[in-house]
Amino acid sequence: MTDPGGWAAVDGAGMLRDVRILIVDDCTVFREYLAAVLAAHGAPPPVAAWDLASLVAAFEAKLPRIMLLNNATRDSAMLLRQAMKLNPNVRVVVLGLSEDDEPGIIQYAEAGVAGYHTRGETLEDLLVLIHKVAAGGSLFSPRISAILLHRLSTLASQRRPAAKGLVLTAREIQILRMLEMGLTNRDIAEQLRIAVHTVKNHVHSLLTKLGVRTRAQAAARARAVLLVVDPDRD
């Protein structure tokens, strides 16, 4: 990871001052070590989680600004989704990915993570990354940046012709916008005042029309699709 002036521009002993951090990892030793390192660099005592129950408790006890998610943690993808529901504004950094794990990099990017700390990067790199992400920025290695740019290019080339011939009903457009917002079937049903099974039918129809298999993939395509089928969207 390159960061011209990044580390030198901050005080190493206080670079994380006032940054509320949540560590999500099911390895106790790693959690405790990382918490000690972060506290030594000025962060308030980090909170920790290792499963869904502890994640919910951590968000209730202390609204974190940054979440550090170890990719090797059991059910890490599910925990990320739940964290985003608990606080859509939390900034997530994924730890432990390999730069060769293209599917993982893309999956996390589509979920909205703000940064990656890969296996080949140092502790100093991680501290700089947390500092940058807490300030509202992002910091990717050249390899990860290349993967994400290639993915965007591929999606753009696939979506444009498909979206032009796509026909969605008014209700499907409503639901697609809600999927883009990350709402559950129950949330959608409550907002539209329809049955949950009706929402499920609409979602299934949307997945079929969009040529995707999951809600996350539909949400990732929503922005490009809605610009074509719903040009008057807000």
Image (spheres, rainbow, N blue to C red):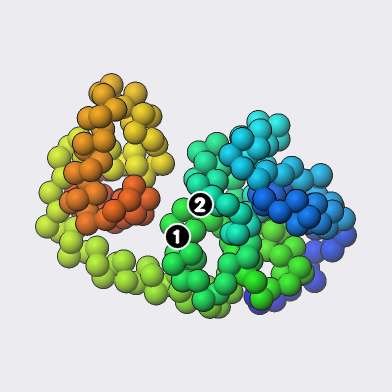
**Residue under circle 1?**
107
Question: Percent x, y for residue 173?
Answer: 23, 41
For residue 102, side relative to residue 172 (left or right):
right
**Label 1 packing within 10 angstroms: few (<14), some (14-19), many (20+):** some
**Residue under circle 2?**
77
Q: Amino acid at mark 2?
A: Ala
Kindly identify the residue that appears in the image at 75 percent across and 51 percent down.
28
- Nearer the camera: disc 1 or disc 2: 2
Kindly identify the residue that appears in the image at 45 percent across and 60 percent down.
107
- Disc 1 is placed on an element classified as helix
Question: Which image quarter: residue 155?
Answer: bottom left
Kindly identify the residue that appears in the image at 37 percent across and 50 percent down.
216
- Disc 2 is placed on an element classified as helix
Question: Percent x, y for residue 225?
Answer: 25, 53
Q: Quadrant of the C terminus?
A: top left
Question: Percent x, y for residue 220?
Answer: 36, 54
Q: Quadrant of the N terminus?
A: bottom right
For residue 206, side relative to residue 58 (left or right):
left
